[in-house]
Image (cartoon, rainbow, N blue to C red):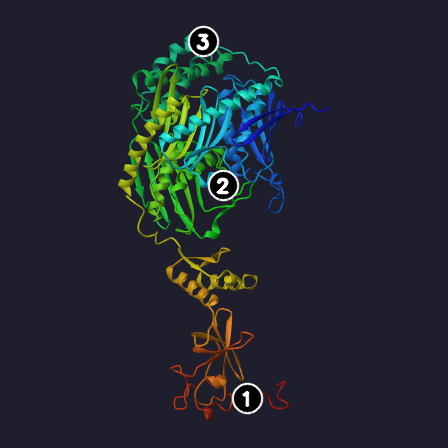
Amino acid sequence: MNNTKSIEIALGSRKMILETGKLAKQAGGAVTVLAGDNVVLVTACVSNKAREGIDFLPLVVDYEERMYAAGKIPGGFFKREGRPSEKEILRSRLIDRAIRPLFPANMRNEVQVIAKVLAADPEYPPDILAINGASASLTISEIPFDGPIGAVRVGFKDGQFLLNPSYLEMDEGDLDLVVAGREDAILMVEAGAKEFPEEKMLEALAYAHEQIIRIIQSIRQFSEENSKTKLTFPESEPAKELVEVVDQAVRQPIRLAIRITEKQQREEELARLDLFLRETLSTKYPEWDPAIQQIEHKILKEETRRMILEEEIRPDGRKPAEIRPITCEVNTLPRVHGSALFTRGQTQVMTIVTLGALGEVQIIEGLGLEEFKRYMHHYNFPPFSTGEVRPLRGPGRREIGHGALAERALLPVVPSQESFPYTIRLVSEVLESNGSTSMASTCGSTLALMDAGIPIHAPVAGIAMGLVKEGDRIAVLTDIQGMEDALGDMDFKVAGTEAGITALQMDMKIKGIDLAIIKQALARAYDARLFILTKIKEALPAPRAELSPNAPRVFVMEINPDKIREVIGPGGKMIKKITAETGAVIDIDQTGRVYITAPTAESGEAARKTIELLVGDVEIGAIFVGKVTRLATFGAFIEISPGKEGLLHISQVSDHRIDRIEDVYKLGEEVEVKVNKIDEQGKIGLTRKGLPGGPSADTPDRPPRDARSRDDRGRRSSRDGSDRPRYGERHR
């Protein structure tokens, strides 16, 4: 029996179709989203019981791409998908950030949202379908969710905004903006841009919100016939008596503690207050111990936000628009290709640049058109950066997300492969953290790139903006620190050059904000960005004129594509030989462009000359300096270029008679020769006649014939120069 129900939503020139009732019917909510050849199944499930001992929503979002969706078989030995790719993790975070603020504050039941790409359109990304599918599946499920939300992607090309553009349109355009929101507010923003002006970004956000409202209205209509009864989670307020006892014990000490400007001292004092409560109140009210901590945290949040809104004083003593002290250093490490240390208050990041051959690009196996990355940024957040102790593991979702944001921020200013033929890897090591490490990584990356001598066309700086909102009272905070992030309502990261924005990322802890607040935040972020760019330029005004002496050198040359096989050689023999002899790495593309990456200029030049000889046409009259590779009775074979030999006949060695070629040349000897003929089969004939320095009758190159007519055993040599043993001597 088919109970499938669906609805169509116009999305630019394409239609998005939501379906339910056919697939995954045992899930709490299951919606299949279709657009073009994209098919995404999104499910939402909730556990029956709350998790004990936690004070947060245990939400897990997984976005999965299966290679069969694009008609591909996974690479590697096992031939099946393994751990999530970087792109899958970033898209999982995209969905998570859009929906997380809309669950009940006291909900502790585990929620899992899975978006599975079943079929992939080669022209259009499926991530927007996954966000809208998550909204629809949560809306029709029994899970309490203050939605629905809608999500769109906005591009900008030739002066026009594009709704849900294709991969190609995004690549050719100036903007890749993803926005999720409710009917009355924007919840999440993620953007990469090519120095996009703030005023145009606000227009793009307004355009996106108009489309989001249409999507939400359609999802509401879709859910009217398909929704389940929602679960309820009654509020559990602590006893009034306990609230009063905790309030009297800690409110005033908390007011004093949050004014301690130094982070560690402030945290130590707050920890002392927490211990005091445990020792004095937990013995009297042991059954209410979790509630005590809850009340204490609420008082801390209230007092911090009150201080910011009423007194315009932040925990470290700054005013709302004030930036922490900044120091910038470059060339901080020896041997590396470029390095920088960026410090902003108690946030410190060291970024290191490494340059490599184009063959060292990161190969990407996924559903999209992108096959490799030549510019990479990796972000590490060790426990010592916050004075903590925890096991070292591989990068988590947060680290991958922060690294991707800083990578996106710098990508628009990185020189193209044609003008700078290197693979570029940056690693940002967070050495100290008190908020906004991703934007510190962006600033450190700019300095490190310039220190390495990479010709970025403009420096990029980043700043994290925060928000405290109580009713109509708001405070937009510049350069938020960790405490303001944890107790505030917004984390809005903005990166760009003097000309415009290159990256945006906005996350909310409340149920969205309007464009007026975003406008104010962008204006403050612009002022802050200009201030930081001034500090960056004071440390290093522009990229260094020369690459770091420790960096490899790249030589670029063009060859006839028909000659590529000659450079590579059978089974890669020739290109391996060049690498072994010169130490250079050779990369060749199908157009015949050759990239030679060498440890020194000398080795690169040697590799270049070798390739020139390989692909150069041998013409009659051309002169070469070659090596003797073989000797025969009739002459010497000379390698005039890698893989190309010619015969120097014994009659062409000199103007006078030469009896034995061994009398003149030995293996490995370098000889200057001239091409005097090339037959129909391509065989090359060489001559020494007419060239200076050759053997003559008056100045023989070897001792006189009489002095070498017998071998060192006293035997007479044969007439053709071979040492034939006499009869009976063969087996002596």
The residue under the point 51% across, 63% down is: 563
Q: CA distance from mark 1 to mark 3?
A: 115 Å
Name which quarter of the figure residue 609 lies in: bottom left
Q: Which of pointers 2 and 1 lies earlier in the amino acid sequence? A: 2
SS of the residue at dot 3?
A: helix
Task: Judge whether 314 appears above or below 360 on screen.
Answer: above
Task: Judge whether 643 appears above or below 242 on screen.
Answer: below
Amino acid carrying mark 3 in the image: Leu
SS of the residue at dot 2?
A: helix
Task: Judge whether 421 appears above or below 515 on screen.
Answer: below
> Residue at label 3?
242
For residue 720, the mark is 1
Specify whether 727 is left or right of 55.
right
Locate residue 22, reporting x and y percent.
67, 26
Amino acid carrying mark 1 in the image: Asp
Query: Is 145 in front, or is 307?
Result: 145
Q: Which of pointers 1 and 3 lies earlier in the amino acid sequence? A: 3
Residue mark closest to the camera, 2 vs 3? 2
Locate residue 355, reporting x and y percent.
41, 50
Say whether residue 388 is visible. Answer: yes
Name which quarter of the figure residue 533 lies in: top left
Residue mark closest to the camera, 2 vs 1? 2
Q: Which of pointers 2 and 3 lies earlier in the amino acid sequence? A: 2
For residue 537, the mark is none
Q: How many marks?
A: 3
